[in-house]
């Protein structure tokens, strides 16, 4: 099995309840171990030049209390920065602001674990797609980060194009289903979780969504 195909098994997924802006919500958690040390992984996640290699071009100031903007994506404010272990920031997109937390942990010699927690409100978008829209979207980013950090896919445009290939679309379907499994483990009805997974797959692959 190649490194791209193996990536789906490297991510651990958890769905939990959370209070978001004083109301009911969820927290979507992904974690993955990378073949590098914490200092290098932190640098890849907090330096504009390196972020552009796997997440997108970033403008603004990546320092505590300052604002950032990812091209054609989210912007926000850096709320916590404890180098080289913890980062928290607002994730403002399409008129909605949520909280994103990143934690890095050493995992032995030249290995580091990245845990990403994205808080999401219980809104219409969540009720239609569940955790998969958030989770699978972040899996794309962690996929490209793995290729960049580990040297098996350091061309962001090529990796993004791969997601449109039959293999990439299978990755999307597998990721969507695994988020459905995580939601079921958290107590969601399996039939609803599966329906939402099919909608997420359609959302990301440009297919008609099932009702």
Image: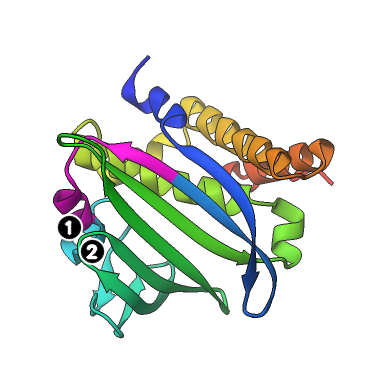
Colour mapping used in the image: rainbow
- What stretch of residues is rendered in magenta? 31-44
What mark, if any, has residue 43 been given in the picture?
1
Q: Is residue 160 visible?
A: no
Q: Could you tell me residue 144's position as x and y percent?
A: 33, 43
Instruction: Look at 27% across and 69% down and name the residue there.
Output: 58
Tell how many labels.
2
Does the magenta run of residues contain 84?
Answer: no
* Relative horizontal placement of residue 194, taking residue 200 as reference (left or right): right
Compared to residue 32, the image places residue 62 above or below, namely below
Q: Residue at x 31, y 63 (%)?
A: 86
Q: Which mark is residue 46?
A: 2
**Horizontal and vertical percent position of residue 78:** 34, 77
| Distance from Cα at disc 1 to Cα at disc 2 | 5 Å
Q: Residue at x 62, y 40 (%)?
A: 179
Q: Is residue 12 left or right of residue 206?
A: left
Residue 171 seen? yes
Say if 68 sits above or below 168 in the image: below
Residue 164 pos. (x, y %)? 48, 37
* Residue 130 % position (x, y): 69, 52
Q: Quadrant of residue 31?
A: top left
Position of 188 with respect to 169 (left or right) is: right
Closer to the camera, 69 or 193?
Answer: 193
Q: Residues within 10 Å of mark 1 (few under 14, many from 20)?
A: some
Give the structural element (helix, strand or loop) at label 1.
helix
Question: Does dot 2 land on a helix, a strand or a loop?
Answer: helix
For disc 2, the neighbor class at 10 Å (few under 14, some 14 to 19, many from 20) is: some
The quadrant of the picture occupied by the N terminus is top left
Check contact, mark 1 vs mark 2: CB within 8 A. Answer: yes
- What residue occupies the far bottom of the structure in this picture? 65
């Amino acid at each position: 099995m190649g490194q791209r195909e193996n990536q789906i098994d490297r991510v651990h997924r958890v769905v939990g309840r959370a209070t978001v802006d004083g109301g009911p919500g969820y927290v979507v958690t992904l974690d993955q171990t990378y073949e590098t040390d914490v200092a290098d992984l932190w640098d890849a996640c907090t330096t504009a030049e390196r972020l552009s290699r796997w997440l997108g071009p970033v403008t603004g100031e990546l320092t505590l209390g300052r604002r950032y903007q990812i091209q054609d994506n989210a912007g926000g404010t850096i709320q916590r920065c404890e180098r080289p272990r913890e980062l928290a920031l607002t994730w403002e997109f399409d008129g909605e602001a949520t909280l994103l937390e990143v934690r890095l942990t050493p995992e032995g010699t030249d290995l580091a674990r990245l845990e990403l927690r994205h808080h999401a409100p219980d809104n219409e978008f969540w009720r239609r797609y569940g955790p998969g829209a958030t989770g699978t979207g972040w899996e794309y980013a962690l996929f490209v980060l793995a290729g960049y950090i580990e040297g098996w896919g350091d061309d962001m445009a090529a990796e993004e194009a791969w997601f449109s290939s039959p293999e990439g679309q299978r990755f999307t379907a597998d990721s969507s289903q695994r988020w459905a499994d995580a939601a079921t483990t958290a107590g969601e009805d399996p039939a609803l979780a599966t329906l939402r997974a099919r909608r997420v797959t359609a959302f990301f692959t440009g297919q008609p969504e099932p009702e």
